[in-house]
Amino acid sequence: MSMLNNGKLKRILCIWLALVTALALVACGSTTKYNVWRPLSRREHKIKVGIINLEASESGYRTANVRDLEERFTAERGYDASFAYSMDNGTQIEMARAFIEDGVEYLLIAAADTEGWNSLLNEAKYTGVKVILFDRMIDEDESLYEASVVSDMLMEGQLAVEYLESLQLKKYKIIHLQGALGSSAQKGRSYAIEDKVHSEFNWKIMRQETANWDREQAKAIVLDALAKGTTFNVVYSENDDMAKGAVEALDEYGISHGPDGAVAIISFDCNKWAMEELMKRSWNYDGQCNPYQASYLDEIIKTIESGGRLANKRIIIREKGFSTETIKASDIQNFGI
């Protein structure tokens, strides 16, 4: 064989080896989800979100709120969402900080307390994480978050107080069951009744105590008031669960309640079972508090992601109150949670 033929054979052998190597590399690469040279498209990108909420066990309202968020923020809807739950403000802040360190793009927060968030919000702003508040407001400058989706808790309380006024009682002797102190829901609903008491001589709070949204704690407070001979004709409860506990205490003492009874029952949240108490004339009034906020949050994020501008920094969910005189069966189906 000539030297020329030997040179040609070597070149052919080198080309053949190169092709085999390339094919082997492609074959190995084919087992991965994506070829390494093809970048992810925008369609394939999952928006990374960290959601801080209170625990579902807090109330019927919170159970509905948690379920609504978990059903909306899914991979099928384009999200890589993580959820964290706590009733403690400090713990929530640490959870949010962990989400920032994990590289979330958005933080959605229902704060346990209105105070203490300044440092965390500044950290988020510095790292480029966008914060959206829901359900609860915080006492910080609006420049530290993108938007908020909230109920007007003060208006909820004012509507309830207006209903109480319409009863035209000679004297208002009130047991005031407060929610978790420091939360925006507690502050708004408490302010409404306290403001009325301070402005009217015939309105008086006989006992005011937090039951932390809990039925058993509320029942214990009312039982203690009854045992001590405290006289009252109104229970102003800042959520349905506490109102239920108060009514259980009244029932144990054989005290009637509702529009035909000795004690007026005022509550908030509009659980279906609570609205049924209105229909039975066992309670007087239930103020709506809408837990279904996930669609609003989803729309805000999608607007930001598309480069659009939000029409309003704060979205206030419109709500109303229901009384035993005005409620209809259809209201329970349409508005009950």
Image (cartoon, rainbow, N blue to C red):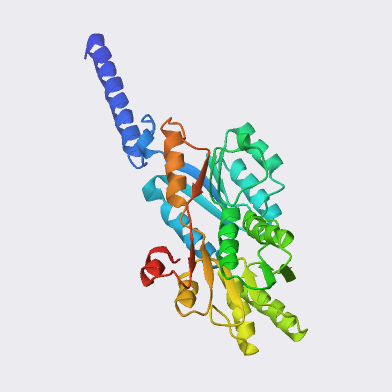
Question: Where is residue 303 shown, x and y percent of the image?
Answer: 43, 36
Nearer to me, 298 or 180: 180
Question: Does residue 46 appear to the left or right of 197 in the view shown?
Answer: left
Question: Where is residue 202 shown, x and y percent of the image?
Answer: 71, 68
Question: Does residue 53 appear to the left or right of 18 in the view shown?
Answer: right
Query: Which residue is farthest top?
Result: 4
Question: How many numbered markers are drawn?
Answer: 0
Q: Quadrant of the N terminus?
A: top left
Question: Where is residue 35 shown, x and y percent of the image?
Answer: 35, 34
Residue 73 visible within the image:
no
Is 117 drawn above or below residue 65 in the view shown? above
Q: Residue at x 36, y 68 (%)?
A: 330
Nearer to me, 85 or 161: 161
Nearer to me, 165 or 223: 165
Question: Does residue 297 appear to the left or right of 186 in the view shown?
Answer: left
Is 5 drawn above or below residue 95 in the view shown? above
Q: Quadrant of the C terminus?
A: bottom left
Q: Residue at x 70, y 41 (%)?
A: 118
Q: Residue at x 54, y 82 (%)?
A: 260
Is 139 drawn above or below residue 189 in the view shown? above
Residue 1 visible within the image:
yes
